[in-house]
Structure formats: structure tokens, C-alpha cells
Amino acid sequence: MPGTPVDPTPLSFAYWVPNVSGGLVTSTVEQRTDWGYDYNRTLAQLAENNGFDYALSQVRYMASYGADHQHESTSFSLALLLATERLKVIAAVHPGLWQPGVLAKWVATADHLSGGRAAVNVVSGWFKDEFTALGEPWLEHDERYRRTAEFIQVLREIWTSDDANFAGDFYRLHHFDLKPKPVDVPGRPHPEIFQGGNSTAARRNGGRVSDWYFSNGKDYDGFVEQVAEVNAHAADAGRAGAVRFGLNGFLIARDSEREAREQLREIIAGANVEAVEGFRSAVQQAGSSTSDKRGMWADSSFDDLVQYNDDFRTQLIGTPEQIADRALEYKRRGANLLLLGFLHYHEEVEYFGRHVLPIIREKEAELVAREPALVAGA
Ligand SMILES: Cc1cc2nc3c(=O)[nH]c(=O)nc-3n(C[C@H](O)[C@H](O)[C@H](O)COP(=O)(O)O)c2cc1C
């Protein structure tokens, strides 16, 4: 953290689109959240009016732990783009299931339909049964990331070149010219490419080829360690400072800290034990399967896994003031964006916009004024 320049641009906010059933926690606790389109359309509109810049859809093709029904991520993302005016929507996609040229075309069209608001989250996957049920090969962990790196390079090549060529182990292009190219948005060379994880391979891809690196929920040290390593990979690849960082967090803001803590306790007490344990065993296919055993969920406790992106670890839980302080501590450590999940989306997104965000903005202005040397990048 010390030595990390504070980003003078305001923290961005994204939310997890609840496009799979069961909400964001694997618990029998009441969740006033619905995975259907009507609920999600209203949510997207509420979100863009309450300070959110991005929505991130989830990709899941078949029933998994606590998510029996799912809407497909790219079509759902497009529907949300068309229902909003400013929100950027990030569609999650798996290399191995999509051909990158076809996806590049899909994104270009979605970008034109939405005035330059389409983005992608390229996920390398952990759910082996989903691939095998679809009849697709399940590559070993680091091979999946090597394929993801090529996938991202192909997207970028197609979006920026009139004569796109690529010769890789997984993908090839021969004089491909995409027309129309994505929308020309100032400051954005092409639709933004997000990628996340925790394993050594995910960090390398984050630094070498991604625009954004998404971290699962982390405490301060866990987040700082990833930022440093991803930045080192970026510098090695001649892209120093090019990667921005998004951090997951499950946000429970209540008028008193006691109420917020009690809400977390209820969520964990109501955990669907069978589903959480099933998920724990399936995600052994992620970073835990690598030789250094470092990866998402490699050291997650049962309580952590009740939120399947370890989001409780970020501890955005308490009063609006406490949450604002914590958000800014992450900003000081390199976060450019917070990716948030909620228990009762509609009402909590509004509560966030009304009570939490104004405090964050106030404290953020103070922080930037207080640390001018860092802001200047000195
Ligand atoms: C922000 C974020 C969103 C993700 N969304 C999905 C998703 O929608 N579907 C999916 O199968 N995996 C998703 N993943 C998980 C990745 O596919 C992958 O399994 C994980 O990042 C692997 O971690 P590892 O690099 O530690 O092995 C997501 C990961 C992150 C960080």
C-alpha cells in the first residue's frame, strides 16, 4: 500500500447481476432477490441511478450448487444494455465454449446497439461437469489459462486491426477484417476486457493481457499481494500501469453495526450445507489443482464459501460510515472498482446510493486532497 499512487479518478462500482437462481449466498435466509428479467431490468435502472457504472453477468449453463436455473449471460447482458442508458454491462464468457471471432462480432454488435457500453469478463472456468455435459474437453488448469490468454489476444486483434492475423496453439486468424469495428469511445481503445482469479496463471494473464483484473473477496493483505504481483507481470510485458483492479465484496449496510453483523450471522447460520460442500469439492478444479496450490478458494473456510466469491472477506459490513472507510482503504491499496453483491438487491442498491455513496465521495475527495504527491504519481 505505501508507495501505491492513489488513483485520482473516483472509485467505480459494479454489481453482480443475479441472473442465476438462489441469490448471491448459498443460504436459506430470506433473499428478496429474483433471477428473472423483470426484476433485473428494474435493478439495472436502479443501479445506474444510484452510482453504479457496471453490471457483471454470471455464466452458468446448468444447475450447480444453489443455482438451479440460469439465464444465459450474453443475451441477458444485451437485454440489460437495451433497458439502460449509461450502465456498462460485462458479459461473462468461457473460452472453450465460444469461438473468439464469433464473440468479437457479438460484442461489436452489442456495442453498437448500446452506444459503446458492451464489455466482457473472460472466465477460465472451474465447473468441469458443465464442460463434460456439453461434450467439450476439460483442459488442465494452466492450459485453460493459456487458452484464455490467446482468446483475449484474438479479441483485441480483431477489434483493433483491419487485417487481423493470429497464429496460436488454440486459435488462428487469417486476414480477418471485422466491420463495423466497435464504437469509437474516447479513452477506450476497444470494449473493456476483464479477467479474474487468484492462481499464478490468472495473475499472469491479468498482467500480460487484461484491461482489468478481478480479485475475489480479500482482506487488505490478500488484495495488496495480488495487486503487486499482477502489476509486476504487467511491467514484464511492457504494460506497466495498464491494468486496473476490481475487488469483490458482499455489502451489508445497516443503520447500526449490530444489525449488519446480525444479518451476516443469520446468512451463515442458514447455510445450505450440502450445496456449500458440493461447491467446495467442485472448485478443487480451480487453482487448488495446480502445483503451487494457489488459487481462488484454495484457503476458503466453510463460512467464506456461503458467499461463493469469498465476498464476506472484504468486510464491507457495518454502517455506511464504516463501509466508506473500508472502501477507501482498498482504494489506497490499488482498487479502482468494487464489485458488489447484496442480499435484497433492489432496496440495498437504493440504500447504497442514498446513504453509503455520498460518504464515500466525500471521504474520497479528502483523501485525494490529503495525498497530493501520490496523486501526482510522484
Ligand atoms: C469476478 C469473477 C467472476 C467470475 N464469474 C464466473 C462465471 O460467471 N462463471 C464461471 O464459471 N466462473 C466464473 N469465475 C471463476 C473463474 O471461471 C475461475 O474459475 C476462477 O477465477 C479460477 O480461479 P483460479 O485462477 O484461482 O484457478 C469468476 C471469477 C471472478 C474473479
Image (cartoon, rainbow, N blue to C red):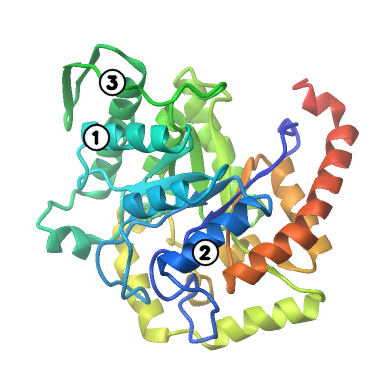
Give me the residue at 71% from left, 43% from top.
Answer: 331
Between marks 2 and 3 in the image, the one whose residue lies nearer the viewer: 3
- The residue at 85%/39% (across/down) is 365
Query: What x and y, as percent, mark residue 290?
Result: 31, 51
Q: Which mark identifies residue 100?
A: 1
- Helix, strand or loop at mark 3: loop
Residue type indicated by callout 1 = Pro
User: How much space separates mark 1 and mark 2, taking CA atoms?
Assistant: 29 Å
Q: Which residue in the structure is indicated by mark 2?
A: 310
Give the side of residue 213 with respect to residue 359, left or right. Answer: left
Whether residue 328 is situated above or below residue 261 in the rendered picture: above
Instruction: Classify residue 349 as left or right of residue 311.
Output: right
Label 1 – label 3 distance at C-alpha: 15 Å
Work out whether residue 8 can be spotted: yes
Q: Residues within 10 Å of mark 3 (few under 14, many from 20)?
A: few
Q: Position of residue 33 (x, y in %)?
A: 51, 74
Q: Could you say where residue 142 lies in the image, as x and y percent from the top left?
A: 28, 43
Q: Is residue 172 above or below residue 53?
A: above
Q: For the view shown, which residue lies furthest in the left direction?
A: 135
Q: Which residue is mark 3?
A: 179
- In the image, what residue type sits under mark 3? Lys
